[in-house]
Image (tube, grey):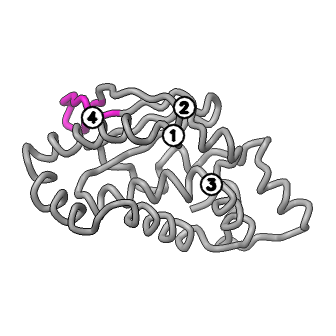
Amino acid sequence: MEVANRLMVKGKSALETEQAAVRVLQSLFPPLLLVLYKALLAPIANGQLAAMMLARATAISCQWLMGSCSVNSVTLPDGKSWSSGVFVEKCKYLEESKCLGICINTCKLPTQTFFKDHMGVDLYMEPNFEDYSCQFNFGVPPPPLDTDKALKEPCLDICTNARRRRELGRNSSPDELSCPQV
C-alpha cells in the first residue's frame, strides 16, 4: 500500500503506474508458466477452461489481498454463462487505500492487461466504489476506456491522496495521476 501511495503522490503518469503494476504481476509467476498457459490452455474451448481455472485460482490465492471472495457465473458477450467470475465481497485493497486512483491504476487496469497480454484471457473488473465489492469477469473483454463506468467515477470523498495533493497545492496536469485517472 505504501508503494501504491508513493506512486500516486509522486506524480507518475497513469501509464507508467499501470506498466509498473503489470511488471509486479509478471514477477509473481515463473516466466515459462505464463508462456505455456497462454499458448496451451488459453485457446482450449474458446478460452473457457482457462477462464474458469483462473477464477478458481484467483478466489483461492488472492484472499490475503482482496478479502473474502467466491467463484460465480458471468454472462459472456455472446449470452453464454460460464462459471468464470470472482466476486470480492469487500476489497481490502480498496478499503485500505481509500483511493479510486490506486484501485484503477494499480489494480483494475494492470490486472486486466496482465491477464490478457500474459495469460491470453480477457478480464473485465467491475469495482463498486460504494460498498468496496468487486466483480472479476474472466472471459469477458473490458469495454473501451472511454465507456468503462469505473473510469467515470469521481474521486472518493475519503481519498487520502487527493487530500494530500490539495494540501500540497499541486495542480496536476492531465498526464499526472489524480482521481479518477487513466
Which residue does the image show at 15% across and 41% down from the upper left? 49
Task: Check residue 133 in the rendering and tell me which mark sits there, or answer none.
Answer: 2
* In magenta stretch: residue 92: no
48 vs 162, left or right, is left
Q: Earlier in the sequence, mark 1 or mark 4?
A: 1
Task: Check residue 84 in the rendering and tell me which mark sits there, or answer none.
Answer: 4
Which residue does the image show at 62% across and 28% down from the upper left? 131
Which residue does the image show at 16% across and 46% down from the upper left? 47
87 vs 38, left or right, is right
Residue 132 x, y percent position in the rendering: 60, 33
Label 3 sits on residue:
102
Report, in whole angstroms, how far the alpha carbon at label 1 lies from the one at label 4. 20 Å
In this rendering, the label closer to the viewer, 3 or 1: 1
Label 1 sits on residue:
64
Q: Amino acid at mark 2?
A: Ser
Where are the magenta residues, as a range?
A: 74-85
* Marks 1,2: beta carbons within 8 A: no
**What quarter of the picture does the C terminus occupy?**
bottom right
In this rendering, the label closer to the viewer, 1 or 4: 1
Q: Amino acid at mark 3?
A: Ile
Report, in whole angstroms, how far the alpha carbon at label 4 lies from the one at label 3. 25 Å
Label 2 crowd bin: few (<14), some (14–19), many (20+), radius 10 Å: many
* Marks 2,3: beta carbons within 8 A: no
Q: Earlier in the sequence, mark 4 or mark 3?
A: 4
